[in-house]
Image: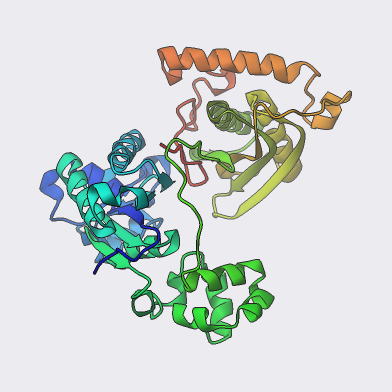
């Protein structure tokens, strides 16, 4: 089917079982067996992070416990995660995409949109480009991906989900009603469980039903999102694909970890918070941004979670400012002796470092952090000196004294957990 009549040609490239596929490059003898990538059960990260198609056939799903996955699939082979390896392959994969167009927008570590409208004269139609990319990635990296080809980003994304693994699916103006509309409304990009339940309450069970529903009624029930979903279902999305060289605008930077043992008491909590805030502040500086809000998520041994946040009077990317704000939240909202399984520290309400900001005569009091008027500037200089040492000698070359020799499993190399930001290209 030709893509000649498409006004835009958008691809969505989705790597197949990315983590598991990267791990299997080192263990080709396991390719015919059900395989899953998991965290370290001994470090209490015992959940499934990714699985291959053979494991998926047994019903193994992402984020379930290793114990549950093994009940479904007794022969499941478990492999440890190597996040640095995944980031390197992400970089190489997106490098291949950039051979075909400079309009590459990363959606996650294993998914990207490509606008190849301007590339069709060089490389052929959208489907031809998609097939060429799949062959190139497989030939050079040994990995497979599924590609959706369409006239907008939403249908391209849904096309890459339509047929897996290692497939190209065209969703055109002429066939989207036949391909997309019969799908369950839950499959519509942007429809979560709660929204699907609300739609089902109105008798809307398919994407076609969503598309044919009165837009005004949807907005009355779901707000602006109702109108947006109606437009998407009718192929009316015109959102652009960002250029690869355009700086990715991040909305938050966070890091969380499950501790090796349940922690309690101020000393334990401070060690955990310092390690996490150190990583978060370093990423803020790397991205050239500061935060105006700090959020803390706390999970207890029974997996009950609370989330609290505080607004800062001045934007910051200084480690000690984030530690002070997070510890303040912990002191106000968590009893020191109660056990904690996981903490996540997230910096939100981001602004560019160069943005002008009015200074307060009451800096310490208004920040709510106890910082002296010149504290953030001195602290930032110190943090940047630490950044320089780590770049030269490694992440473990320098750290905070409160983090040294801890037995809870945190340090400057604390690995990203469920609320962490994705580092991009």
Quadrant showing the C terminus: top left
Farthest residue toward the bottom? 203
Number of marks: 0
Farthest residue toward the left? 29
Q: How is the image coloured?
A: rainbow
Q: Residue at x 71, y 17 (%)?
A: 377
| Residue 144 shows in the view | no
Q: Tell whether 202 sits left or right of 164.
A: right
Farthest residue toward the right? 361
Residue 84 screen position, x and y as percent: 35, 33
Q: Residue at x 24, y 69 (%)?
A: 1
Location of residue 281 by image quarter: top right
257 over 195 or under it: above or below: above
Location of residue 424 by image quarter: top left
Residue 35 screen position, x and y as percent: 23, 53
Q: Residue at x 31, y 37 (%)?
A: 95
- Which of these two is toward me, 240 or 43? 240
196 over 46 or under it: above or below: below
Residue 306 screen position, x and y as percent: 64, 51
140 over 115 or under it: above or below: above
- Which of these two is toward me, 129 or 232? 129
| Residue 38 shows in the view | yes
Residue 15 screen position, x and y as percent: 30, 51
- Which of these two is toward me, 265 or 324? 324
């Amino acid at each position: 089917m030709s893509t000649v009549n498409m006004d835009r040609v958008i691809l969505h490239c989705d790597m197949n079982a990315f983590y598991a596929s990267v791990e299997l490059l080192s263990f080709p003898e396991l390719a015919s067996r059900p395989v899953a990538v998991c965290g370290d059960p001994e470090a209490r990260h015992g959940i499934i992070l990714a699985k291959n198609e053979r494991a998926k056939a047994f019903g193994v799903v992402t984020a379930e416990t290793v114990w549950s996955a093994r009940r479904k699939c007794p022969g499941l082979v478990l492999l440890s995660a190597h996040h640095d390896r995944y980031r390197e392959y992400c970089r190489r994969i997106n490098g291949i995409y950039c051979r075909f167009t400079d309009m590459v927008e990363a959606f996650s570590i294993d998914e990207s949109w490509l606008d190849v409208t301007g590339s069709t004269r060089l490389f052929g139609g959208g489907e031809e480009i998609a097939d060429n990319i799949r062959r190139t990635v497989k030939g050079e990296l040994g990995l497979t991906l599924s590609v959706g080809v369409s006239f907008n980003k939403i249908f391209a994304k849904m096309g890459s989900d339509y047929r897996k693994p290692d497939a190209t699916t065209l969703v055109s103006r002429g066939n989207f009603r036949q391909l997309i509309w019969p799908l369950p409304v839950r499959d519509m990009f942007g429809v979560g469980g709660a929204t699907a339940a609300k739609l089902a309450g109105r008798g809307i069970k398919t994407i076609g039903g969503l598309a044919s529903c009165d837009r005004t009624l949807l907005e009355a029930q779901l707000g602006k999102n109702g109108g947006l979903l109606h437009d998407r279902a009718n192929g009316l999305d015109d959102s652009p694909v960002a250029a690869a060289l355009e700086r990715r605008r991040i909305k938050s930077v966070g890091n969380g970890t499950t501790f090796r043992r349940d922690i309690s008491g101020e000393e334990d909590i401070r060690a955990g918070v310092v390690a996490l805030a150190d990583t978060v502040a370093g990423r803020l500086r790397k991205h050239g941004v500061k935060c105006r809000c700090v959020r803390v998520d706390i999970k207890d041994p029974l997996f009950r979670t609370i989330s609290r946040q505080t607004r800062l009077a001045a934007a910051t990317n200084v480690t000690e400012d984030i530690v002070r704000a997070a510890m303040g939240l912990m002191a106000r909202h968590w009893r020191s002796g109660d056990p904690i399984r996981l903490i996540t520290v997230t910096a939100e309400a981001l602004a560019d470092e160069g943005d002008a900001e009015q200074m307060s005569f009451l800096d310490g009091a208004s920040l709510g952090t106890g910082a002296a008027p010149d504290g953030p500037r001195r602290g930032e200089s110190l943090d940047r000196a630490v950044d320089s040492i780590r770049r030269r000698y490694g992440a473990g070359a320098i750290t905070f004294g409160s983090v040294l020799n801890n037995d809870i499993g945190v340090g400057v190399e604390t690995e990203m957990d469920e609320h962490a930001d994705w580092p991009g290209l």
